[in-house]
Image: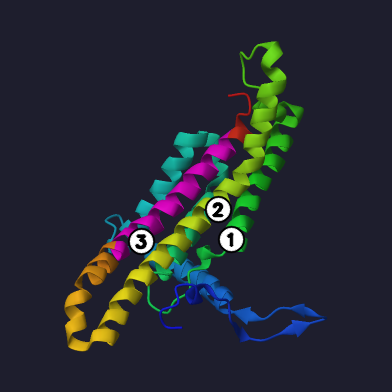
């Protein structure tokens, strides 16, 4: 079980609870989502509580995160897109912190469960559709008919654009889920190789375990990078999709 790469993703009940036949148990997944929200909120409140003209280290980090997401949103959706800043910033910080949490031994990686990533993706696409219709009315459907398309090609283009739009929540959720899942499985496999060699060959196993250990260290560094990149990719795609709701004819 110690070397089972799948065991780390198992959801366990910490506080069993059932109400009216509905399972409302508090799980390890719920625990780490709560910790992610608490840590993120605590850090942002602490770092900005005593804002100074010359920022300290914590204030600098929080301001960098703020400006990073704000620039993504402005560049992708324009100044009008800043009304969605709280949502995009919250998504970016939650995904980033939960991914970093998962890098610690015996911690749980929330984003390795597609039910979580799918919920975020559906929320994003739902926001795009609702706001797009509220702001543009039926003009929102110009999104599926690019300008300058010959009339004879309109049915084909509309079909392709609708199919592309429908696939957005699937690609948005699967990309994040699959990258985090694959990375953690690969990391656990190489770490398991090292432990198995040492356990099987004793002192001589250390020499054989050098290569798996080196791969494990390299993959750990790569996974920290992936933790940030996946939060960035989710945030930038969210900004691009929101731009479609704001400017459907572009």
Name the residue nearer the viewer: 66 or 147: 147
Name the residue nearer the viewer: 34 or 221: 221
Q: Residues within 10 Å of mark 2 (few under 14, many from 20)?
A: some
Q: Verify whether residue 241 appears in magenta.
A: yes
How far is mark 2 from mark 3, CA to CA?
Answer: 17 Å
Q: Which label sits on residue 174?
A: 2
Q: Verify whether residue 77 appears in magenta.
A: no
Question: Mark 3 and mark 2 in contact (Cβ < 8 Å)?
Answer: no
Q: Which residues are magenta?
A: 219-243
Q: Which of the two labelled residues, at mark 2 and mark 1, occupies the earlier sequence position?
A: 1
Query: Which residue occupies 65% across, 29% down?
Result: 160
User: Which residue in the protein does label 3 denote?
Assistant: 223
Q: Quadrant of the C terminus?
A: top right
Q: Which of the two labelled residues, at mark 1 and mark 3, occupies the earlier sequence position?
A: 1
Query: Which residue occupies 55% across, 53% down?
Result: 174
In the rendered view, how is the structure colored?
rainbow
Q: Position of residue 136 (x, y in %)?
A: 71, 30
How far is mark 2 from mark 1, CA to CA?
Answer: 7 Å
Q: Is residue 55 visible?
A: yes
User: Which residue in the protein does label 1 denote?
Assistant: 114
Q: Which of the two labelled residues, at mark 2 and mark 3, occupies the earlier sequence position?
A: 2
Query: Which residue occupies 63% across, 42% down?
Result: 167
Q: Is residue 87 visible?
A: no
Asked which quadrant contains residue 23, the reply is bottom right
Q: Would residue 226 appear left or right of 211 to someone viewing this image?
A: right
How far is mark 1 from mark 3, CA to CA?
Answer: 18 Å
């Amino acid at each position: 079980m110690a070397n089972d790469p799948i065991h780390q993703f198992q959801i366990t009940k910490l506080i069993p609870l059932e109400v009216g036949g509905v399972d409302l148990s508090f799980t390890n997944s719920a625990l780490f989502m709560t910790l992610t929200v608490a840590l993120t909120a605590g850090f942002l409140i602490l770092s900005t509580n005593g804002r100074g003209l010359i920022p300290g280290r914590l204030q600098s980090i929080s301001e960098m995160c703020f400006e990073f997401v704000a620039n993504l949103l402005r560049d992708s959706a324009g100044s009008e897109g800043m009304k969605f800043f709280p949502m995009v910033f919250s998504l970016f910080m939650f995904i980033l912190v939960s991914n970093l949490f998962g890098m610690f031994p015996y911690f749980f990686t929330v984003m390795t469960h597609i039910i979580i990533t799918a919920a975020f993706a559906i929320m994003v696409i739902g926001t795009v559709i609702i706001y797009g219709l509220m702001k543009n009315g039926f003009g929102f459907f110009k999104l599926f008919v690019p300008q300058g398309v010959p009339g004879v090609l309109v049915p084909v283009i509309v079909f392709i654009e609708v199919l592309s739009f429908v696939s957005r929540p699937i690609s948005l959720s699967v990309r994040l889920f699959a990258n985090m899942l694959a990375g953690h499985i690969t990391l656990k496999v190489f770490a398991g190789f090292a432990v198995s060699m040492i356990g099987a060959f004793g002192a001589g196993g250390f020499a054989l375990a050098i290569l798996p250990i080196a791969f494990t260290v390299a993959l750990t560094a790569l996974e920290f990078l992936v933790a940030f990149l996946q939060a960035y990719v989710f945030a930038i795609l969210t900004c691009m999709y929101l731009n479609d709701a704001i400017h459907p004819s572009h």
